[in-house]
Structures are given as C-alpha cells and as structure tokens.
C-alpha cells in the first residue's frame, strides 16, 4: 500500500514512479543479505544523496565500469529469478503459449517502437515505451482467456494396476 501511495504522490509532483521489488530480489540473491537493518541503512544513504548535494557528489566518484558491472549482475540475477519462476510450473501447451506469446510481443514492441508513431500519442506512451507493459498485459490476458487443463494426469503404471485388478 505504501508503494502505491508513494507512486501517487510522486506523480502528483511530476516525478516518475519507483520500482523497487525486482531490484531487491536481484540484490538479495546476489549478496544473500536479508536484514531489514541493512536495507534501512541503504535507504538512508540514498535519502542523504537526494537531500545533500555534497554527499551525492561523493557517490558520483564511483567509476562507471563498477556501476555498470553491478547493474549487469543485478539485472541478470533478476532475469534468472524470473526464469526459475517460469520453469517451476509445468510447461504444458497452455503455459508455453502464455510465456512464448508474451515474451515475443514484448520483444516485438521493443523492436518496432518506431513504427508505433502512427498510433495516438496516449497509446504510444502507454504501450510503446516499455515492452514490459505489453508482455505483462498479454500474460494476464492469456492466463484469463486460455482454458485450464483441470485433468490430473494419471501415471500409466496406476492404470495397468487398476486394469489388472490389483
């Protein structure tokens, strides 16, 4: 709830929404630190950087190659966490269709964003600027539309035992 309220307040003052959850997953997976005290300390450092220009100037001395390496590491870990989540489910035809179409449309929108200029600006801003929006909407829509297979698969050995009267 606090996350939603902070995004509403940020939007009122003309700022961009924040996205913190996925980065935390990558950071926690990378360094194995789950202490709230560490995250509170880190949040206070970020707050100080936003309020105190001298402190933020110190942070700008971190070399770009270090920041780039940390960014690649965190986001690759986030991607792998997502892949683990996807593969934790049975990859039947329904799930393969949902994941495949969503990913393909997300990548397709990213590649064809220049051709979206013929659509109204509101549509382009919402759907053309972030492939994640299209991929997420498609995954949710397909999950609602595609029929679920409610049948539980029966192992062949169980069928043979029952047929033999055992």
Image (cartoon, helix red, strand yellow):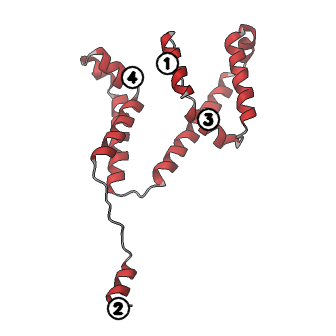
> What residue would you read off at disc 4?
129
Evaluate whether residue 22 shows in this view.
yes
Q: Nearer the viewer, residue 109 or 8?
A: 8
Choose mark 3 or mark 1, whichever is in front.
Answer: 1
Residues at marks 4 and 2, CA–CA distance in whole angstroms: 62 Å
- With 5 as the anchor, is 115 left or right in this view? left
Cβ–Cβ under 8 Å for marks 2 and 1: no
> What residue would you read off at disc 2?
165
Cβ–Cβ under 8 Å for marks 3 and 4: no
Residue 95, horizontal then vertical, whole percent: 36, 52
Evaluate whether residue 60 shows in this view.
no
Residues at marks 1 and 4, CA–CA distance in whole angstroms: 20 Å
Residue found at x 42% / y 32%: 132
* Disc 3 element: helix
> What residue would you read off at disc 1?
8
Q: Nearer the viewer, residue 71 or 154?
A: 154
The image quarter containing residue 21 is top right
* Disc 4 element: loop
Earlier in the chain: of badge 3 and badge 4, it is 3
Residues at marks 2 and 1, CA–CA distance in whole angstroms: 65 Å
Residue 24, horizontal then vertical, whole percent: 61, 35
Residue found at x 25% / y 19%: 119
- With 27 as the anchor, is 22 left or right in this view? left
Earlier in the chain: of badge 1 and badge 4, it is 1
The answer to whether 90 is drawn above or below residue 63 in the figure is: below
> What residue would you read off at disc 3?
24
Task: Specify few, some or many for label 3: CA neighbours under 10 Å numbering under 14, 14-19, or 20 or more.
Answer: some
């Amino acid at each position: 709830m606090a996350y939603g309220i902070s995004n509403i307040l940020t939007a009122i003052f003309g700022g961009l929404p924040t996205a913190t959850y996925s980065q935390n997953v990558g950071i926690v997976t990378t360094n194995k630190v789950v202490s709230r005290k560490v995250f509170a300390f880190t949040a206070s450092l970020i707050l100080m950087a936003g309020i105190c220009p001298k402190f933020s100037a110190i942070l700008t001395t971190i070399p770009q190659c270090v920041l780039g390496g940390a960014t690649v590491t965190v986001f690759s870990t986030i991607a792998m966490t997502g892949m683990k989540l996807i593969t934790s489910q049975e990859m039947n035809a329904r799930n393969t269709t949902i994941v495949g179409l969503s990913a393909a449309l997300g990548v397709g929108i990213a590649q064809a964003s220049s051709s979206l200029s013929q659509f109204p600006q509101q549509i382009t801003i919402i759907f053309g600027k972030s492939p994640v929006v299209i991929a997420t909407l498609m995954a949710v829509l397909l999950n609602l539309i595609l029929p679920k297979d409610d049948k539980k698969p029966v192992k062949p050995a169980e069928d043979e035992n029952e047929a033999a009267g055992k």
